[in-house]
Image: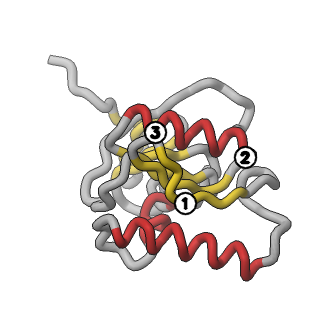
Amino acid sequence: RHGESGKIALGFVKGFGARVGAVGTTASLDENTLLVAGSSDKDMALCANILIEAGGGMAVVDHGVVLEKIDFPVGGIFSLRPWQEMGEGISRIHRCLRERGSPFPKPIYALMFLPFVTLPALRITARGLVAAKERRLVPLFVEG
């Protein structure tokens, strides 16, 4: 979204818990770039593409079916729809993910914090995997 660099950063996420093919958002702390996590390449691609087509938002996809989706067409992070409607949409996404096993009360926020490099942990950003405490990029795989 920011300059369309074409870069794709990859990482592994453990403990999200929701048994869905993909969950994605363009609204995240720090970066506000497209962020998709999941267990199915096809569902992750579908999730990414529907968010791109919408100009941004949040979505949950499983087995090729869009379970929940809300659009953020203004810069990928805002909507001109009434705040009550947007709040209901985000609540539906949280509920959908909790019903499918996420241990978090508001699961989409766990995904939104992944690129937030001010938290002292491993983070996934548009530049790649970042060890936030050490302020350095980390390779996804160790060569050996």
Dot 3 or dot 1: first in sequence order is: 3
Q: How is the image coloured?
A: secondary structure
Please state the horizontal and vertical placement of residue 113, each as a whole percent of the image: 48, 61
**Residue at image x 55%, y 60%?**
68
Identity of the amino acid at label 2?
A: Ala
- The residue that disc 3 covers is 44
Element assignment for label 2: helix
Q: Quadrant of residue 140?
A: top left
Q: Is residue 131 above or below residue 103?
A: above
Query: The N terminus lies in which quarter of the figure?
Result: top right
Does the residue at mark 3 contact the one at mark 2 (Cβ under 8 Å)? no
Dot 1 or dot 2: first in sequence order is: 2
Please state the horizontal and vertical placement of residue 8, each as a whole percent of the image: 51, 29
Mark number for residue 68? 1
Identity of the amino acid at label 1?
A: Glu
Please state the horizontal and vertical placement of residue 44, each as a whole percent of the image: 46, 39
Q: Nearer the viewer, mark 1 or mark 2?
A: 1
**Which residue, as the protein is rendered here, is positioned at the far bottom?**
84
Give the camera-side residue of 5 and 86: 86
Identity of the amino acid at label 3?
A: Met
What's the CA distance linking mark 1 and mark 2?
Answer: 13 Å
Does the residue at mark 1 contact the one at mark 2 (Cβ under 8 Å)? no
Query: The C terminus lies in which quarter of the figure?
Result: top left
**Residue at image x 53%, y 37%?**
46
- The residue that disc 2 covers is 54
What's the CA distance linking mark 3 and mark 1?
Answer: 14 Å
Dot 3 or dot 2: first in sequence order is: 3
